[in-house]
Amino acid sequence: MRVFTSFILLLVLCSWGLPASAQLGCGSSVSVNGGAIEVAAVSGDDAPNIECALNAATAQGFGSVLLTSPQYSIASKVVVDGFTGEFKGISIANTRVQVQDGWMNCNASNPNVIQFSNGFGVVVRFMTIAVGSPCQFTGSPSVIGFTTDPNNCADRTTFGTVDRVTIRGQGLQGTDFVDGVLMFTADNCGPRILGTLKVNRSTFDQLDRGVVSGVVANGQVDVNFNTFTAVGIPIFMRDQSQSTTILGNMIEYNNGDYGDNFFGRYGIRMESLAGSPANNSTTIKNNTFRNQLVNSFGIAVGLGVFTDPVNHAVFISDNIFEGATGSQTADNGAGIGIEGINDGVISGNAFRGGTREWIFLTTSTARPAIAGWSILANDFSQSTAEIDIQLIGASESVVGRGQDNPSFFDQTGANDILEGTAQAAP
């Protein structure tokens, strides 16, 4: 018995003596510190060690993976399934992750630099990620991707958060079309993604798209208190069925010449195409939109239903829209453009400077009818727009009193304009 007991004790002592990296199955730069796994930078590609640390945390129940060095390099994908916890640096200023150029096969599925799937509480925070053109050939990668599990499409729920992260690209100088944060189904999985996405107090600069989402089944998406500068489309959402809150952001728009009538022109773009879910909800509140006047027209908020009717509840309130200084001819776009959506509210917004029209509600033979909008308590006192409100094909909508006598064009005459100055369409 003494011999057997001594043998067991020897095994325990030996296991305690193993380096932390060996216990985790990772390299020597990965270690355990209390309840966290720490990753130190190496000379070369840090992605394998970061991926190993995140997968080890998933397997062994650690709740935090910490980047402890000031500089990291990524030259291969980080793919993690089932991680729940924090992946974080020291701070935005003191943890910099450089995504190297020319290594990613962007023709393969899911070209995400850092990819999380099937995680019930993934938080990425406290770091700066710099990205240029990671694709071997021109492609469309995302820096942080929350997806369904590409190896098991039935696992399609992920709860992702990006908090106090700066993602900085090269904009039109780069050869790739780069997204900052994406939450979408994996390319090989048919059903759309479930869960939540929260993007908080982060900065997106010189990217083609900032935040991209398509969550269904009444998921939750919050994009709050962020800054978007020189981003082709700061916030882009397609065919979603989610409760979306976009609150307190600073959003530059109309800030890149992509040579078409779409990219580089919008601040927020949401669209529902054929087969889109039937229900959606969006609140856009307390944001500042600044027109950078790069193109001949820009649209701060563009929401559209283009084929099948969608019950999309829209509330746009207490935002500031800053257009061209002085003359409206510097921009032929709109502040708020709504196509084929009924029963929304536009209230308490301030419209400053010029554009073609600040509020544009429209429909056509290819889109559902538009009706039931309330345009109330907005401030047009500093507007120099060619026209403040255009209602094209709209009916049963109300333009309330006390909005500084906005100019308007009502094509159908089937709306209640309680105060304003009628004029011809621009």
Image (cartoon, rainbow, N blue to C red):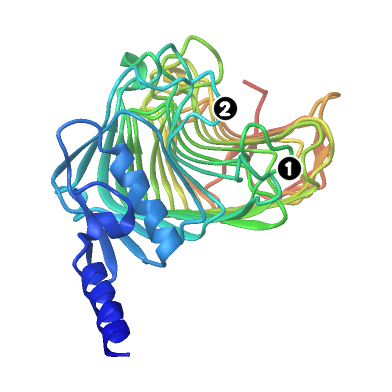
Horizontal relation, residue 368 to residue 419: left or right = right
* In the rendered image, the vertical position of residue 181 relative to residue 281, given as above or below: above
Report which residue position mark 1 lands on: 191
- Graded by Cα atoms within 10 Å as few (under 14), some (14 to 19) or many (20 or more), the crowding at tag 1 reads some
Decide which of 45, 422 is in the foreground and name it. Answer: 45
| Residue 348 at least partly seen | no
Place residue 370 in its image quadrant: top right
- Graded by Cα atoms within 10 Å as few (under 14), some (14 to 19) or many (20 or more), the crowding at tag 2 reads few
Task: Check the image and name the residue furthest to the bottom.
Answer: 1
Horizontal relation, residue 334 to residue 113: left or right = right
Horizontal relation, residue 239 to residue 325: left or right = right
* In the rendered image, the vertical position of residue 83 relative to residue 373, given as above or below: below
Horizontal relation, residue 238 to residue 119: left or right = right
Q: CA distance from mark 2 to mark 1?
A: 16 Å
The kind of residue tagged 1 is Pro
Report which residue position mark 2 lands on: 109
Q: Position of residue 5 (x, y in %)?
A: 30, 86
Nearer to us of marks 2 and 1 is 2
The number of callouts visible is 2
In the rendered structure, find residue 222 and report the number of the disc placed on it: none
Q: Position of residue 140 (x, y in %)?
A: 48, 22
Q: Residue at x 30, y 20 (%)?
A: 101
The secondary structure type at the circle numbered 2 is loop
The secondary structure type at the circle numbered 1 is loop
| Residue 350 at least partly seen | yes
Place residue 87 in its image quadrant: bottom left
Q: Position of residue 350 (x, y in %)?
A: 46, 48
